[in-house]
Amino acid sequence: MNEKILELITVRLDTLGVKIGVVGEQLWYVLIKQVRIEGWAYLGATGLLLLLVLILSLLAWSARKDRGDDTICCSILGLFIFACMLGTSYCGLARVFNPEFYALQEILRVFGK
């Protein structure tokens, strides 16, 4: 990363830290923790979506003997929720394993305005 940009970010972090009563370095660690918490929240949402997919799969499996219409509807909805689950799991894992990138991205977004 360009040293000039890194210095600018450090100065802005310190300025923001002074406004809220902490130093920039402490603010950085708070941002890192927040990004990790967001990542775990995404992974929790992934778990809930997985549970929903399993319930819909069981409903589709039990309904296939009775009538065919519910099977198709549950299957399509299950596939849609499964795709959402893949997206949330990616977001969650990325934030848990690489929180610095997302914290820096958030800082640049805030200061870019």
Image: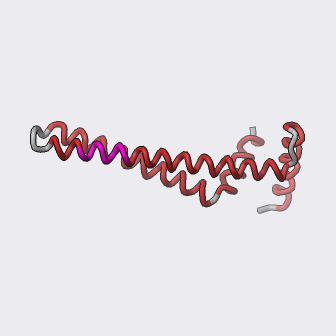
Nearer the observer, 15 or 62: 62
Magenta segment includes 57: yes
Quadrant where the N terminus is found in the figure: bottom right
Q: Quadrant of residue 77?
A: top left
What span is in magenta?
A: 51-58
Location of residue 92 with respect to 20 vertically, above or below: below
Secondary structure mostly taken by the magenta-highlighted segment of the chain: helix
In this rendering, position of residue 83 left or right of residue 20: left
Number of marks in the image?
A: 0
Image point (12%, 40%), residue name: 68
Please provide percent x and percent y for residue 32: 70, 52
Please provide percent x and percent y for residue 95: 60, 54
Q: Residue furthest left?
A: 66
In this rendering, position of residue 29 left or right of residue 83: right
In this rendering, position of residue 6 left or right of residue 92: right
Image point (66%, 55%), residue name: 99
Magenta segment includes 104: no
In this rendering, position of residue 62 left or right of residue 91: left
Q: Quadrant of residue 70?
A: top left
